[in-house]
Image (tube, rainbow, N blue to C red):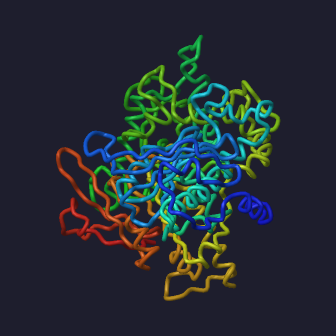
């Protein structure tokens, strides 16, 4: 839900309005920079480092706090490109994304990040414990949900302006996963903060994302390792070997649907695999190449999902790097799946009011009850509002991407968000009822949405990267060209190196797909064209 504009305005008034002054030298920022509720705790001129993992140009490293508990950092390069970029967080945040800031610093950007108001190194605030209402009320949850990012963006841009004596010409957001949710929240609630957004694999439906654990792990486990007293019958129902067997069967059936046998499934929603049909039942004799009734039932639950709360898992991430072995079914029998690790304590401290310390979703979850007890959490965390008309009208741009084979954050959700934006834009232009088309096959809503928001689905890519796809992609350069020069991105080329061979592949704006021409080298992006298929 969009923040009431009266409250948004009050928050904006509580922080600097980026009235340019200065320039203020790096060493003088702690003494000379003043803004309500903002304290600069240090400003250090860092000399250029030209070797090693921390290589970076000369810059001013600024650290500070907002409202006492929101920590932030700003890097101000001596050789500045006149642009500002804020980077997002992963998981439940709790630390400043220094590594991602440094990446943008090397490109000449003034960069910033925040810990979102809590510190993972402090036991009482680590994980989801910052949501302990007895200790913190709802304040730190609100900071994590949306407030800290906005306040840091406004503060950091003001520091940039006062240090250099001029405001940044353009401001960008760059984040994946939680960072994708943060970016969408900014676009929905505070569209004036940034000119362009890179939104990767967004867990924008945050309450729905938490429901992924009971939807995907309850069919597989009675208890999650490592837990004392674990029994062999506690799970997983499907072994790592069976997981890989199922994955191999899926690729055998669906890899070639796009005309290429290349270890990638271009669009898993076109895959017609059915474990009940395409893998034989074990019957009375369990074996490595068949499925028992219990294994089949568990897999069918995962692929079906729990609509309308959790979409089914697309085929193809079962046996790829960064796939089920990371998020759902670890290789080790004592391994704990990442979905559990990042979600379990959210049910204790973030999802319900009052808090439920000790809550166990494997035993306590009820699909008829718990999903309807999260309304307050939705207001704080969810960036589900498709109302991006302010972004569209202001000429701002959003470039979204998601790996097709991401078991950590389902790409189907991202498609649904984009579809919701298209519908809202179409409604706003008076063509909601029917199938009025413009230029043949393109709905007006889709055509207008593509002018400011584009979604790229990357075959074979896992969560924010990795997998077996061409997941090495420069998303920033096309966004900058779009924002600053009006060059609308079309195919964006990604690369991968496997077996000593580097190949390239175009990633197409949804709903187009990269189709091989049937002649050229499949390792070369030029051999593919973006096409919208029926």
Nearer the observer, 214 or 114: 114
Residue at the farthest top position = 229
Compared with residue 147, is residue 435 higher up or lower down, i.e. above or below? below
Position of the C terminus by quadrant: bottom left
Task: Please state the horizontal and vertical placement of residue 70, each as a whole percent of the image.
Answer: 64, 43
Residue visible at 59% across and 57% down? Answer: 153
Q: Looking at this view, is 43 or 339 the one in front?
A: 43
Q: Quadrant of residue 93?
A: top right
Q: How many numbered marks, from 0 up? A: 0
- 312, above or below 125, in the image: below
Location of residue 78 in the rendering, given as x and y in whole percent from the top left corner = 38, 57
Is 223 situated above or below 488? above
Residue at the location (35% across, 41% down)? 248
Q: Is residue 252 above or below residue 193?
A: above
User: Residue 15: horizontal and vertical position, in percent?
Assistant: 69, 58
Instruction: Name the side, left or right, on which 503 lies relative to 422.
Output: left
**The N terminus: image quadrant:** bottom right
The one nearer the camera, 529 or 193, is 193
Identify the residue at the far bottom of this view.
439
Task: Please give left or right for residue 18 compared with residue 200 in the image.
Answer: right
Q: Residue 211, can we see it?
A: no
Q: Which of 376 and 418 is in front in this view?
A: 376
Residue at horizontal 54 percent and vertical 73 percent from the top: 396
Q: Which residue is drawn at 54% across and 56% down?
A: 412
Can the viewer see residue 51 in this picture? yes
Is 510 on the left-hand or right-hand side of 139? left
């Amino acid at each position: 839900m969009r923040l009431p504009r009266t409250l948004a305005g009050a928050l904006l008034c509580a922080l600097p309005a980026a009235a340019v002054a200065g320039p203020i030298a790096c060493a003088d920022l702690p003494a000379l920079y003043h803004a309500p509720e903002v304290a600069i705790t240090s400003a250090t001129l860092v000399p250029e480092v030209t070797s090693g993992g921390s290589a970076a140009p000369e810059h001013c490293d600024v650290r500070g706090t907002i409202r006492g508990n929101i920590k932030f950092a700003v890097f101000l390069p001596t050789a500045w490109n006149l642009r500002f970029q804020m980077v997002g967080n992963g998981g439940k945040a709790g630390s400043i994304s220094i590594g991602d800031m440094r990446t943008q610093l090397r490109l000449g950007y003034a960069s910033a990040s925040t810990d979102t108001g809590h510190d993972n190194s402090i036991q009482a605030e680590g994980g989801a414990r910052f949501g302990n209402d007895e200790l913190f009320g709802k304040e730190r949850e609100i900071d994590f949900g949306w407030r800290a990012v906005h306040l840091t963006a406004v503060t950091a841009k003001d520091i940039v302006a006062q240090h250099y004596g001029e405001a940044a010409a353009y401001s960008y957001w760059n984040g994946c996963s939680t960072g994708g949710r943060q970016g969408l929240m900014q676009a929905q609630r505070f569209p004036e903060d940034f000119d362009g957004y890179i939104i990767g694999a967004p867990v924008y439906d945050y309450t729905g994302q938490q429901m992924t654990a009971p939807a995907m792990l309850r069919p597989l486990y009675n208890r999650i390792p490592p837990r004392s007293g674990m029994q062999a019958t506690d799970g997983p129902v499907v072994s790592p070997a069976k997981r890989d067997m199922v994955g191999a069967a899926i690729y055998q059936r669906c890899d070639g649907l796009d005309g290429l046998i290349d270890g990638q499934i271009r669009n898993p929603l076109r895959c017609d695999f059915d474990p009940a049909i395409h893998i034989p039942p074990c019957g009375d004799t369990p074996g490595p190449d068949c499925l028992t009734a219990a294994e089949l039932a568990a897999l069918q639950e995962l692929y079906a999902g729990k609509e309308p709360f959790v979409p089914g898992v697309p085929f193809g991430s079962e046996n790829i790097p960064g796939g089920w072995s990371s998020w759902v079914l670890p290789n080790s029998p004592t391994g704990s799946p990442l979905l559990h690790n990042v979600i379990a304590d959210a049910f204790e401290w973030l999802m319900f009011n009052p808090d439920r310390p000790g809550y166990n979703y494997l035993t306590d979850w009820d699909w008829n009850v718990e999903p309807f007890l999260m309304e307050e959490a939705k207001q704080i965390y969810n960036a589900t509002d498709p109302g991006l008309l302010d972004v569209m009208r202001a000429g701002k741009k959003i470039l979204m991407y998601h790996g097709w084979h991401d078991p950590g954050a389902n790409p189907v959700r991202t498609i649904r968000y984009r579809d919701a934006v298209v519908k809202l834009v179409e409604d706003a232009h008076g063509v909601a009822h029917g199938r009025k088309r413009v230029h043949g096959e393109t709905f007006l809503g889709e055509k207008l949405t593509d002018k400011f928001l584009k979604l790229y689905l990357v075959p074979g890519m896992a969560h924010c990267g990795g997998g077996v796809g061409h997941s090495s992609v420069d998303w920033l350069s096309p966004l900058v060209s779009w924002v600053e020069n009006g060059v609308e991105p079309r195919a964006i080329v990604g690369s991968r190196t496997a077996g000593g061979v580097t190949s390239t592949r175009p990633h197409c704006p949804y709903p187009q797909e990269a189709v091989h021409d049937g002649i050229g080298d499949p390792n070369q992006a030029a051999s593919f064209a973006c096409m919208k298929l029926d």
